[in-house]
Amino acid sequence: MKHLISTFALVATCWIHTSAQTVHSPDGALAVTLRLTEGTLAYEVKLHDRVVLEPSPLGLETNLGSFSSGLTAAGAEATTIDERYTLPHGKVRDVHHRANQLAARFANGAGGSLEVVFRVSDRDVAFAYRLSVEGKQKVVIESEKTGFDFPADATSFVTWQAKAGDGWMATKPSYEEGYLMDAPVGTKSPSGLGFTLPALFRIGDAGWALVSETGVSSKYVGSRLADPTSAGLYTIAFPEAGENARRGEANVSAALPLETPWRTITVGRTLAPIVESTVSTDVVQPLYEPSREYRPGRSTWSWLVWQDASMNEADQRAFVDLAATMGYEYILVDALWDVEIGRERMAQFVADARAKGVDVLLWYNSNGHWNDAPQTPRNRMDTAPARHVEMAWLKSIGVKGMKVDFFGGDKQATMKLYEDILSDANAYGLHLNFHGATLPRGWERMYPNFMTSEAVMASEMLIFSQDFADREAFNSTVYSFVRNPVAPMDYGPMVLNRRFHRDADKGNFRRTTDAFQLATTVLFQSPLQHFGLTPNNLEEQPAFVLDFLKDVPSFWDEIRYLAGYPGRDVALARRHGDRWYVAASNGEKQAKELSFTVPFLAGRTLTLIHDGPDGTAATRSLTVAADGRITLALEVGGGAVLFEP
């Protein structure tokens, strides 16, 4: 239940006589100051009196007039937020959200009212606009002035926006580009189109800030950061007109009154607040009730290593058996199943899998005219009548979820397609995984049957690019601090074959150790984990590796940052029930020792799986020192996992 309590009775009257208002976090360390100067709005953010954001612009431009200039103060209200909620399959299960909120209203002189709402917790700043216009029921948001002005000494860890229609079969943008690392603020994107969210910034010795957004539904577009000014000002940009093969407008058409999505800034002296933040779900609410309890779980997935040729009934039955042997909840049957297995045989396949305790997930093309991808099934997800027929059939044969691929943009029309697929699927008890897709923005709370999304250059690229395979360990130290903190990430971790191919003497070479691969099952958070395990691994790997993979959870109750720096290394701890798992990886090209403390495990004896000879995994017991300190030896491309036996 949410509790809103008025805290500053004089704010509404005081605003008229001052040019600024400040709202602090509950612990007083984080402060946001909102200023009105000659009719324009700006805000600044400080942590422990150190500047995180210099005065940064606010406002909207609409077809009903400007809400970024010519504004006058019209009152304000301050409240406190104290809310507890549960995420059944998030990175944290039981969340206690406490924050102070300032809602300041401004008039534009033409009957319009803009309310700027800032909510400040001990680690997060979230803000949104509420817009109304006297006598009007609809509005077009043409652009935003919203900006993030970082100090000159800040550096960025950001991934650039792809050009519309680029990539394989014109399926981009899909949040699958590379990263600029520690680049000075003001550095332009290689594409000239700015950067996708989330975006991480190091603020000199003042700490870190992760910029993102949440609460995006069919009522708005997904935004990005435009290329910055040379001084380090990044502003919100809307989608390109060419996205989704020009389907839909690039601006926002909405009913009034309108509340925009929340822009979020997670701030900390270390990366701990970044990793542990729940702001993406703190400021949103469920849009509908789940039609059933949606079960997270582990899944076998033949396509990752065995590729399209494995989309036949014999191979898929082998992966059902693999899932049953490992105790996994699911098998994902990827593209082309409708041709290679056939719809007529799928009902029996699902029944046989369920008899072995394995539920089935099926792949779909998002369809429509916005991509040229030939993979089938096509023409099943792009219209409501087709969706309802297909989803009714899926429910009738016992399928539990879908993977839907190839969306290619962030327009409002595309956000509506996501929402329509999700809400329709809920009516049939189906959960969703999106690939070739946008960043999910608070969706694990907004849409109860949403499970996960790709929205990252994921493990499929290990198959397609040796360069990507060479950077696999490096990427693990980037994704853990930039992409995964804001939303579940279906990377598809954990491949134990030495080469990325069904045949042992073909395909790209794996440059990481077996212990690294096990670590990714904990480092990468997704309530559906599609592992790259293959049947031959059962004979090749020692029992302690297989036992770990049988037990490792796919959903968590708590997360803690332990150590790391993007591009160098990472160590995280996750708790499932009363059992802790610790995982670490080395992203650099030299072996190292990584030290950190786990005071909550002090004195306990853990099982350690670490780098052994020639990339294999080794194991031993490790008793944590009384001060909680652990030191791990990590090879190049190496990793480690510790867990309570």
Image (cartoon, helix red, strand yellow):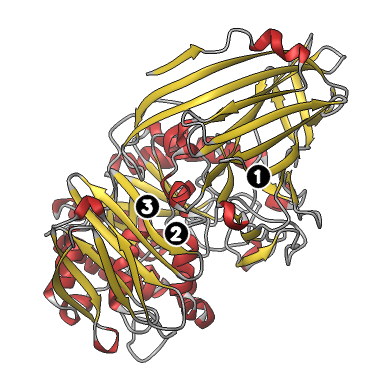
- Is 475 located above or below residue 512 in the figure? above
Please name whichever residue, 81 or 243, is drawn nearer the observer in this view of the structure: 81
* Residue 345 place in picture, x, y as percent: 29, 57
| Identity, as a three-letter code, of the amino acid under mark 1 | Val
Which numbered marker is on residue 51? 1
Residue at the image position 34 percent from the left and 52 percent from the top:
528
Q: Residues within 10 Å of mark 1 (few under 14, many from 20)?
A: some
Residue at the image position 23 percent from the left and 50 percent from the top:
600
Q: Residues within 10 Å of mark 2 (few under 14, many from 20)?
A: many
- Is 447 located above or below residue 17 in the figure? below
Q: CA distance from mark 2 to mark 3?
A: 12 Å
> Mark 2 or 3, which is nearer the eye?
2
Helix, strand or loop at mark 2: loop
Residue 374, can we see it? yes
Residue at the image position 27 percent from the left and 44 percent from the top:
398
Please name whichever residue, 499 or 574, is drawn nearer the observer in this view of the structure: 574
Residue at the image position 14 percent from the left and 78 percent from the top:
542
Q: CA distance from mark 1 to mark 2?
A: 25 Å
Question: If you read the primary sequence from the N terminus, does the residue marked by circle 1 or circle 2 appear first?
Answer: 1
Residue holding disc 3: 526
Helix, strand or loop at mark 1: strand
* Residue 300 place in picture, x, y as percent: 28, 63
* Residue 285 place in picture, x, y as percent: 46, 27
Q: Quadrant of the C terminus?
A: bottom left
Asked if disc 1 and disc 2 are in contact, CB closer than 8 Å, the reply is: no
Residue holding disc 2: 480
Asked if disc 2 and disc 3 are in contact, CB closer than 8 Å, the reply is: no
| Identity, as a three-letter code, of the amino acid under mark 2 | Ser
| Identity, as a three-letter code, of the amino acid under mark 3 | Ser
* Residue 314 place in picture, x, y as percent: 26, 70
